[in-house]
Amino acid sequence: MSETATTPVIDRDALRRKYAEERDKRLRADGSAQYRRLESEFADLAVDPYTPVAERAPVTDHVTFAFVGGGFAGLVVGARLKDAGIDDYRIIEKGGDFGGTWYWNRYPGAQCDTASMIYMPLLEETGHMPSEKYAHAPEIREHCARIGRQYGLYDKALFHTQVTDVRWDEAKAVWAIETDRGDRFTAKYVGLGTGPLHVAKLPGLPGIETFRGKAFHTSRWDYAYTGGSPEGAPMDGLADKRVAIIGTGATSVQAVPHLARAAKELLVFQRTPSSVDERNNAPIDPDWFATVAGPGWQKAWLENFCGNLAGGFAAEDWVQDGWTDLGKRIRKEILALPMDQRTPENILAAYEDADHAKMEEIRQRAERVVADPEAGQKLKAWYRQLCKRPCFHDEYLQAFNEPGVRLIDTDGQGVERISENGVVANGVEYPVDCIVYASGFEVGSEYTSRAGFEVTGKGGITLSDYWEKGMRTLHGIHIRHFPNLFMVQPTQAANLIANVPHNIVDHADTIAAVVRAAEDRGAATVEPTAEAEQAWVDLIASGAGRTIGSTECTPGYYNNEGQGYADASRFAAGHPAGAMAYFMHIDAWRRSGAFEGLAFG
Ligand code: NDP
């Protein structure tokens, strides 16, 4: 197939109608309730297939800092604290090692979707050169272990351990932490970095428990069954198997080419196609890397990407990928408007035109690459690019040209049910040996429900109650009534979801600076003032609200399956002036050393 694009012709009104039609087909009354957690009768599917659980005695000591979550957040905060002279640090992690999402997601083909140079944290500090522009999962997981080793974070870590309760002990001014391994210990400070996508979900399909073949979720890949390895050894266990994969999101897009090569037959069950743009991965050349990796290089790269994303406002584009391309296109459309016509409406229309042009190119790519014209049409995504997670891959669409691969499109209706023998869709039963659920992760439920524990602060106030009418923080990190507690997540902060690690590294800098200041001042507690928190929440609420998640979009986890988020969600946004504005504000705030808005007690 030729990969040459032609210039698309855009009919804005026709596209709007088509997008609305496609969305309406997919709307369903049960919204997010259509999914099931890997619990109760599905608990077996949640078992860690990668590391055996080691017996250990419960821990009952005290540490200076306890961090919930051993992904990038816990690792980077630990590293920055160590640099700030605080190394009595314990990570509590439900997986069997560090890595967070990269611990669990070992499906074949897993790889970062944002360039390694900016996605992998602490490259400069560890001296690691990523092997590829978009590194594969084993390298990222090993990088997590490298950070853990370099900063001594393994020493006190508790793996295969789920926190069950975090409670402020007023009398002792410490946090009391309980876990499912019987641990009861205390910490002066607590950090929460549980990540947004850590509760795997299954489609709540009738008959799902009756299937007699093999079934697993992509975040619990069963290499004992499939053969092969996350490092890319061929999955020879599938050579005589008919495999179904349910879901066509970012995970499926990466896994399908590998399943297509390994399985005798692969049936890809699609409800909504992903937009799949070019990836253009390549090895990183050590000579080139040596020229860019001078002192401060990674921070400069983070800022360059962030600047380009915010409408192409950085001078050069170093990363040059699908994310920055969109930013540059929007900027070009806006700059094409005469000065006196740059009204908010015209700017939004320019954004829409840039989006339509991009999506049309992506749709044309599906048509060009896929040999079967019908499948090529069905693989076209009919929504605006940020309605769903944009995907980038150079082998996914091509996989549908393999002889054993079939797209089973369901015209937005999804799989109907699972039978003893296989998958039922469009009224047809497809017998299969194995079902891979690429059905994603729970998003949008209450923070404490997803985290799996409640946090109880001063005066017995719970985080669930405190946030009932919407999230409240100072800078997305500190919470009134929850002294010495720090969140690591992007909301009410930079909200730079195209490169979440940038938010994490920046939060880690803040946390280390605040803890260092508290220790230097001999403070027992540090907590935001009521005024500072209110002012920050007001600032967040003064913006346009969530930048993604419009109910005009096709349903998905971005928009609570088409139902949108309640009024409280207007607080679930980033800095109204954008990610760069947040980073600049915080940088100045940290540097001043006054930590305005925090009360040290
Ligand atoms: P998603 O939630 O994106 O995808 C779930 C898929 O399951 C969707 O295609 C959904 O269809 C489909 N589905 C659900 N129910 C049914 C049904 N009854 N019948 C048929 N299909 C069904 O999960 P992913 O794991 O793919 O991705 C989750 C997120 O993880 C991504 O958005 C991204 O943020 C992150 N990720 C990041 C990667 C990276 O950076 N390298 C790689 C992979 C994931 P529908 O769209 O219609 O709801």
Image (cartoon, helix red, strand yellow):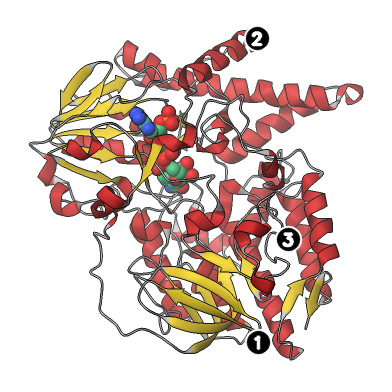
Task: Tell me: residue 212, above or below residue 219.
Answer: above
Dots 2, 3 in contact, CB < 8 A: no
Residue highlighted by disc 2: 13
Mark-to-mark CA distance, 1 and 2: 64 Å
The reply to whether the residue tagged 1 has its Cβ within 8 angstroms of ligand 1 is: no
Q: Is residue 414 left or right of residue 8?
A: left
Residue highlighted by disc 1: 171
Q: Looking at the image, is mark 1 or mark 3 nearer the viewer?
A: 1
Q: Residue at x 73, y 32 (%)?
A: 331
Q: What residue type is disc 3 on? A: His
Residue highlighted by disc 3: 475
Task: Indicate the secondary structure of the residue bearing disc 2.
Answer: helix
Q: Earlier in the sequence, mark 2 or mark 3?
A: 2
Say few, some or many: other residues with alpha carbon within 10 Å of mark 3 (under 14 / 14 to 19 / 20 or more). Answer: many
Indicate the position of residue 317 as horizontal and vertical percent values.
64, 45
Task: Tell me: residue 550, above or below residue 466.
Answer: above
Q: Residue at x 53, y 13 (%)?
A: 21
Q: Quadrant of residue 415?
A: top left
